[in-house]
Image (cartoon, grey):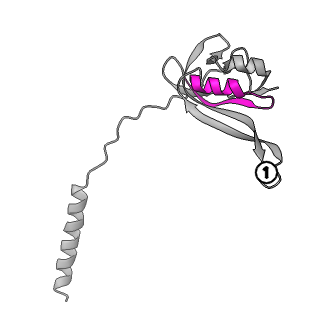
Amino acid sequence: MKKYYPCFLMVAFFTILGIHANAQTAVKGVEKPIVKYKPPFVQSYLGTLTNKTAVASIEEGKKLIVLPLTIMDDKKITYTISSYQFAYKRIGAKEDEETGKITAETDMVTNQFTTTPLPTLWQTNIAETLKKGESLYFFDIIVLDKQGRRFFAPELNITIQ
């Protein structure tokens, strides 16, 4: 046993030395510094309506739904819309099968779009059924600036009065 102990230590020493000698050092790539981007202050417009809570009559709502969604800053520079989501909160009727009583009930129809104004089918369906108490809601509006950087524009919620 005494005779094998020095041989074992020598083999272990050279093995560790060989592993260390063959180890590769990591090559550090050139990292680009992260440039903080402050998006411009913009407003979302549908016709002349803006803000998170806008109010329109039924007739105004029918005229607004065919207009394009526009994103502008205070210098009147228009930004390109990459995508947005639209939700139409509508009021319908529900009949209780047992009693036959009809009650008002709301539901929401929503979709994501990449073009503005809304597709013709959406415009027609909304214009034909628009009622007081319903709402048109544009949200998750992603906008591109001149350099192609993406940022969110404020949402726009129009309540029909």
> Under tag 1, what secondary structure?
loop
Residue at (63% x, 23% y) in the render: 123
Q: Amino acid at mark 1?
A: Asp
Expressed as whole percent of the image width and height from the top left, the position of residue 1 reads 19, 89
Residue 73 is situated, as x and y percent measured from the top left of the image, at: 65, 16
Q: Is residue 102 left or right of residue 119?
A: right
Seen from the viewer's position, the closer of residues 44 and 138 is 138
Seen in the picture, residue 47 relative to 37 is either above or below; the reply is: above
Please name the residue that numbered disc 1 is placed on. Answer: 96
- Please determine whether, in this image, residue 159 is positioned above or below residue 22: above
Q: Is residue 71 magenta?
A: no
Q: Nearer the viewer, residue 74 or 59?
A: 59
Quadrant where the C terminus sits is top right
Label 1 CA crowd tier, 10 Å (few <14, some 14–19, many 20+): few
- Please check the rendered image and state whether residue 125 is part of the magenta-colored stretch, yes or no: yes
Q: Residue furthest bottom?
A: 1
Say whether residue 19 is left or right of residue 50. Answer: left
**Residue 16 sits in quarter:** bottom left
Observer-nearest of 132 and 144: 132
Percent coordinates x, y for residue 157 in the rendering: 72, 28
Q: Position of residue 59 (x, y in %)?
A: 76, 18
Q: Which of the 4 image quadrants contains residue 46? A: top right
Near-viewer residue (58 or 70): 58
Q: Residue at x 35, y 38 (%)?
A: 29
Q: Residue 41, located in which quarter of the rendered image?
A: top right
24 with respect to 148 (left or right): left
Q: Which residues are magenta?
A: 119-143
Q: Judge left or right: residue 148 versus residue 139.
A: left
Above or below, comparing residue 39 to residue 25 in the picture: above
Q: In the rendered picture of this protein, how many numbered marks are placed on residues? A: 1
